[in-house]
Amino acid sequence: MNPTFHQRTLEIRTHGQGFVDVTDAVREVVAEAGVGTGICSLFLQHTSASLVVQENADPAVLRDLAKWMARVAPESHAYEHDAEGPDDMPSHLRTSITRTSETVPVTQGRLALGTWQAIYVWEHRTSPHTRRLVVTVWGTQKAGA
């Protein structure tokens, strides 16, 4: 069986610092690909936002993550790299300790996420942005496709 490859770039609009659940948008790309068993690779083309696979049931988890991150990489004018304001360098620090890519298995044509898992773009800048998420799906075609 020849592998199937499919790729689409999603534009994700953020509202400033916080999380945007992109799970359904990624599921849509996986469905378009027609892959039964394979891999979904996600790559965020930015250095001041990141990707996280995290709990989707209790919103307190995301709030606690945001509070923790604010302590680890606080906004400040003390950084040398501050051309775009006090959130400039902290956003890069935050991205450096998280990720700009994730890989999720595809099983029976679906993302093999756990029951309480979702995929989030984590915006680290205070202003809204449009972020580009490259979704690449490859694997074997679904039976009957």
Image (cartoon, rainbow, N blue to C red):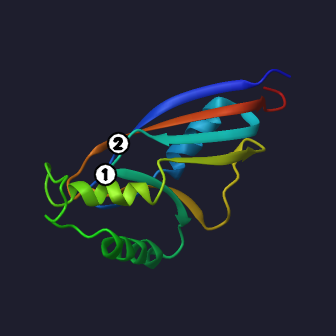
Depth check: 110 or 122 in front?
Answer: 122
Amino acid type of the residue tagged 2 in the rendering: Arg
Horizontal and vertical percent for residue 53?
A: 55, 59
CB atoms of marks 2 and 1 within 8 Å: yes
Residue 28, placed above or below residue 53: above
- Tag 1's secondary structure? loop
Res 16 seen here: no
Residue behind mark 1: 14
Q: What is the C-alpha distance between the residues marked 2 and 1? A: 7 Å
* Residue drawn at x 57%, y 36% as measured from the top left: 29
Residue toward you, 54 or 27: 54
Which residue is identified by label 2?
131
The residue lying at 21 percent from left, 59 percent from top is 87
When the figure is inspected, residue 144 is found, relative to residue 99, above or below; the finding is above
Query: 88 left or right of 26?
Result: left
Amino acid type shown at disc 1 = Thr
